């Protein structure tokens, strides 16, 4: 399955990328529901562990990083805490003329434990909440 959400921001692409490029800095722009973040390793292959309420730890592995294209990709790693398999997501920041920039958050995954609509709603909900937090950070 594929999910893609795009959001427009009135901030400069470089300002948005400055927040997103830091794989371990997710709490700088999305503190909602995230209690802690640690990163093991550096660069591609590094793993961030995100602590969420209930003592749950979600791990994500940095799979690709392109500074010039303002893009990075990650996958779920270790024990799955979300009912999605083979999850691979990419966030990319694009210039958008006078309006600032747009960010595309795209993923592919399998969802054997969920019906298609439920899986799509789950991922879109996560992305929309993340974009709302990013917008709040950039456009208070």
Image (spheres, helix red, strand yellow):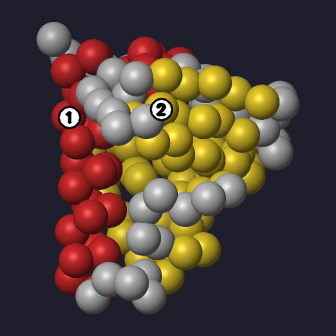
Q: Nearer the viewer, residue 120 or 134?
A: 120
Vertical placement of residue 120 versus 115, above or below: above
113 left or right of 33 in image = right
Query: Image quadrant of residue 129?
Result: top left
**Judging from the image, what secondary structure is the residue with disc 1 in?**
helix
Name the residue furthest left. Answer: 140
Residue 88 in percent (x, y) is at: 58, 64
* Residue 75 relative to residue 32: left or right: right
Q: Which residue is mark 1?
A: 132
In which quadrant of the rendered image does the N terminus lie? Answer: bottom left
User: Please, which residue is most extreme toward the top here?
Assistant: 140
Q: Which residue appears at 26% of the width and 64% of the height?
A: 122
In front: mark 1 or mark 2?
A: 2
Secondary structure of residue under mark 2: strand
Whichever of labels 1 and 2 marks the residue nearer the N terminus, that label is 2
The residue depicted at 63 percent of the width and 24 percent of the height is: 38
> Which labelled disc corresponds to residue 51?
2
Residue 14 left/right relative to 96: right
Position of residue 113 measured from the top left corner of the image (x, y, whole percent): 39, 84
Residue 16 image offset from top left, x and y in percent: 43, 24
What's the residue at 52%, 46% (across, down)? 58
Distance from disc 1 to disc 2, alpha carbons, whole Å, reads 20 Å
The percent coordinates of residue 120 (x first, y second) are 28, 73
For the C terminus, give its image quadrant. Answer: top left
């Amino acid at each position: 399955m594929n999910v893609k959400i795009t959001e427009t921001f009135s901030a400069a692409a470089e300002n948005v990328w400055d927040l997103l490029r830091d794989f371990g800095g997710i709490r700088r722009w999305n503190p909602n529901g995230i209690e802690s973040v640690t990163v093991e390793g550096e660069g591609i292959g590094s793993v961030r562990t995100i602590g969420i309420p209930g003592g749950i730890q979600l791990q994500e592995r940095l799979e690709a990083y392109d500074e010039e294209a303002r893009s990075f990709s990650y996958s779920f790693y270790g024990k799955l805490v979300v009912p999605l398999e083979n999850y691979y997501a990419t966030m990319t920041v694009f210039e958008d003329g006078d309006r600032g920039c747009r960010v595309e958050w795209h993923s592919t995954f399998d969802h054997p434990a969920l019906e298609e609509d439920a899986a799509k709603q789950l991922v879109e909900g996560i992305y929309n909440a993340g974009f709302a937090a990013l917008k709040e950070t950039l456009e208070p």
